[in-house]
Structures are given as structure tokens and as C-alpha cells.
Amino acid sequence: MNTEKTNKILVVDDESDIVEFISYNLKKEGFEVATASNGKEAIDVAKVEKPDLILLDVMMPEMDGMETCVELRRIDALKNTFITFLTARGEDYSQIAGFDAGADDYIVKPVKPRVLVSRIKAMLRRSNAEEENSNSTEVGGLRIDRDRYIVVKDGNEMTLPKKEFELLALLISSPGKVFNREKILTSVWGEDVVVGDRTIDVHIRKLREKIGESYIKTIKGVGYKFEA
């Protein structure tokens, strides 16, 4: 038995049959599963369990998925945790709003077990690959520490949401190089994750708010580049 390779998933949904269905299929694939029936409970459980990935329903009473995601992203111990929204077709849900709240991906209900498991494994594989290739890069007074998953600017440390960190790490890996949108989407979100083109713009905007406007340049009609 190799417990080190057992990833933990937190399933959050106010519909018990959905929680049971998803939990059953994840356990079949060897995942460890924790559950919660609402946003507030999810936060409490996540603090204790520290899951590798959280499947979070969007429409829930008391505290909806968006609010819950924002609160989860404020917890330092969960900074490397993937958050994937579960959303029903026809719900009043904006993909951009979800990524803006700090989500990494979204899956449409009704959930197909094979698709769900495939998406989860793809995200966790990328996470493991990032850990194996972690190091530190410093350019123009900005340092990316992949071992500690932090950014240091002018001696001040800051913790970014996972996708913002990955996007910045990609751009800073080759200063002056223009990364087109396709390359950014593939490198940061992966080929198995379908996201809208505006997703990149949202993350770039948030990065600029945190590290300053001067580092990331927009190349109209092409993509973005990092300049010191």
C-alpha cells in the first residue's frame, strides 16, 4: 500500500444523491474522498482534510459555490488545492466569474464518471509534474519560488492562486518571448480542460493588480510576454 500516491478529493454538493454518486466513482478509482453538503461545511472540512482537489457545486443554499471558492482561496494551507466547479446546464453561471473567484476548472452536470475521473487525473498529473520540476527564477526584481509556491517582489512575499502562479511562472521562464494564447492555455490549463479565451485575460488582469502593470506586456492579436 502506497498512501503517498493517494490523492484526496472533497466533494461539495447539497444534493446527497450527487455526492454519493460522485464519491462512489472516485473511490472506485482509488481516491480518498471527503464530503460536505454546503459551503460553510466545505470550508471547515477543507481546513482539516487539506484535499488535493475540491469539487464544488455552484448553486447551494447559505453560501454558494462562488462565495465558498473565494473563502477557500484565502486559506494559505489550501493554496495548491485545485478547485473545480460543478454546474448544471442552464444555471446562471459565468465561466469567467468562476475563474475570477479562483477556480481552476468547471464540469457540467449531469456528471459522466469517465469524464470526471479523466479531468481530475489530468489536473493532478500536471500538479505532480510541476512539483518534480520546481525551482526558482528571478528577473527584474521579481522572484518565482516554485518550491515554496510564492512570488517575492522587492523583498515582500506574496501567495498567488495556483493558476495565476502557473501563468506568471510560464511568462517569466522566457523573458521577452511572446506566448500565444494557445500555448498559454495548453501549458497552464492543459489540453484536457476546456476554458474560454477570456480566461487568460482575467488572470493577466489579476496578476497586474498584484505585481504591477509594467511586467506583463500585451501583444495585440497574439498573446503576452514578460519584460523586466
Image (tube, grey):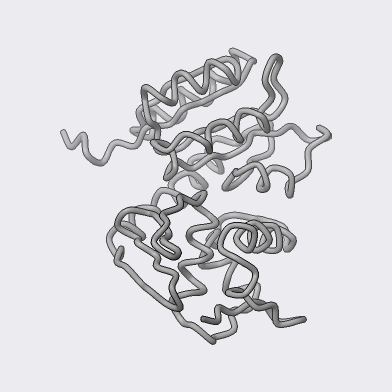
Where the N terminus falls, by quadrant?
A: top left
Residue at 42%, 38% in the rendered image? 76
Position of residue 128 measured from the top left corner of the image (x, y, whole percent): 33, 54
Position of residue 218 measured from the top left corner of the image (x, y, whole percent): 69, 77
Q: Is residue 8 above or below residue 96?
A: above
Q: Quadrant of residue 164?
A: bottom right
* Horizontal side of residue 66 vs 225, given as left or right: right
* Horizontal side of residue 53 vs 87, given as left or right: left
Residue situated in front as seen by the camera: 87 or 141: 141
Residue at 57%, 47% in the rendered image? 104
Q: Quadrant of residue 59?
A: top right
Residue at 40%, 32% in the rendered image? 51
Q: How many marks?
A: 0
Looking at this view, name the residue that lies furthest to the bottom. Answer: 176
* Horizontal side of residue 109 vs 142, given as left or right: right
Q: Is residue 24 above or below residue 29?
A: above
Residue at 61%, 74% in the rendered image? 216
Q: Is residue 90 above or below residue 49?
A: below
Position of residue 89 measured from the top left corner of the image (x, y, whole percent): 78, 35
Looking at this view, name the residue that lies furthest to the left. Answer: 1
Position of residue 181 measured from the top left corner of the image (x, y, whole percent): 65, 73
